[in-house]
Amino acid sequence: MFNALLLTQQDKITHATVTQINDDQLPAGNVTVAVNYSSLNYKDGLAITGKGKIIREFPMVPGIDFAGTVLESADARYQVGDAVVLTGWGVGENHWGGMAQKARLNADWLVKLPQGLTSQQAMMIGTAGFTAMLCVQALIDGGIKPEDGEILVTGASGGVGSVAVTLLAQLGYKVVAVTGRVAQNGPLLEQLGASRVIDRQEFSEASRPLEKQLWVGAVDTVGSKVLAKVLAQMHYNGVVAACGLAGGFDLPTTVMPFILRNVRLQGVDSVSCPVEKRLAAWKKLAELLPASYYAQACHEISLSQVPEYAEAITNGQVTGRVVVKL
């Protein structure tokens, strides 16, 4: 028997309960992992609160990422005792996820934990940090260099945004962070490496097709009107890496930034990212993130606290990363 956060649904209302599970209730898979840490992402928050149609089959153990140690393996790539990390692949959505003391899954979905990272640190990075690394890599692949100008990060106080700020600053970029709570979050964002912090209100109004050119690159976690305004403010040849929809999934923009300023809008998906790309991203994360990141931008909670924090994260009341100790 082991503890798990189990989601059930009755009359279209989602209920989250910490309960005990038998090993034989675990889903099919060729590797069983003792989960040390999971993390709470915005998508987890939507799933646990029922505010988003993330989960369609119940009961479900949420948690789109986890780090732990292999307990059993029928795959030659993984031995008992190996430290592993998982992000994506629909885990925590259509396959039982990381908010349990054990997980059973397909070996193809796992990555061995990079040297120098603990399970706790891996979840301080988590899906959000992994996604942030993919966004930063998209800017680099697009030819954006530190000397070119300022990089904008929207939703900077959230999980993806806070890691993106840190990574970009570590790589020498001049980062401008956008948050809805400048007084509260500004000092932390500056500690993480932002050169300045601006209010989200500056992006709340509908944009013109083209505005003053301000940013050579951007990481957007918000979508909707915010992303539309960011696109209108991009420099010629600018690159925007878009990975989130915290502000909405619509995009009220025009073709003008693309056909007149040669702006590139690069979508970033971390769920089905190829294994080679995953390994490279995790290696870079282990190399780039300073010790100060782990000290400044993370909260650790227990499994029983997850429903409360899930509500808070969907209401924009959580700064940085939330790690769940199993």
Image (spheres, helix red, strand yellow):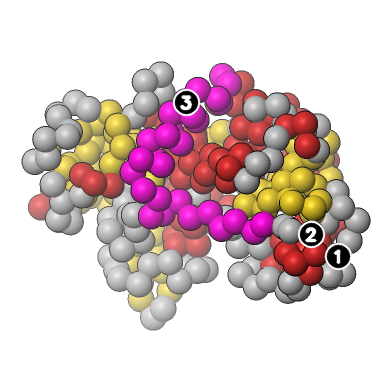
Q: Amino acid at mark 1?
A: Leu
Foreground of the two, 165 or 40: 165
Q: Position of residue 243 (x, y in %)?
A: 57, 55
Q: CA distance from mark 2 to mark 3?
A: 35 Å
Q: Amino acid at mark 2?
A: Arg
Q: Position of residue 45 (x, y in %)?
A: 50, 57
Q: Amino acid at mark 3?
A: Ala
Q: Is 265 included in the stretch rendered in magenta?
A: yes
Taking the image as drawn, is residue 282 in sight? yes
Q: Is residue 64 left or right of residue 252?
A: left
Q: CA distance from mark 1 to mark 2?
A: 9 Å
Q: How would you rate the neighbour count of disc 2 (Cα within 10 Å): few for under 14, some for 14-19, many for 20 or more? A: some
Residue found at x 45% / y 51%? 270
Determine whether the residue tagged by mark 3 lies in a helix, strand or loop.
helix
Q: Are marks 1 and 2 in contact (CB under 8 Å)?
A: yes
Looking at the image, tell me whether mark 1 or mark 2 is earlier in sequence order.
1
Residue picked out by circle 2: 261
Which of the 4 image quadrants contains residue 168? Answer: top right
Residue picked out by circle 1: 210
Query: What is the quadrant of the N terminus in the image?
Result: top left
Q: How would you rate the neighbour count of disc 1 (Cα within 10 Å): few for under 14, some for 14-19, many for 20 or more? A: many
Residue found at x 49% / y 35%? 125
Q: Is 267 included in the stretch rendered in magenta?
A: yes
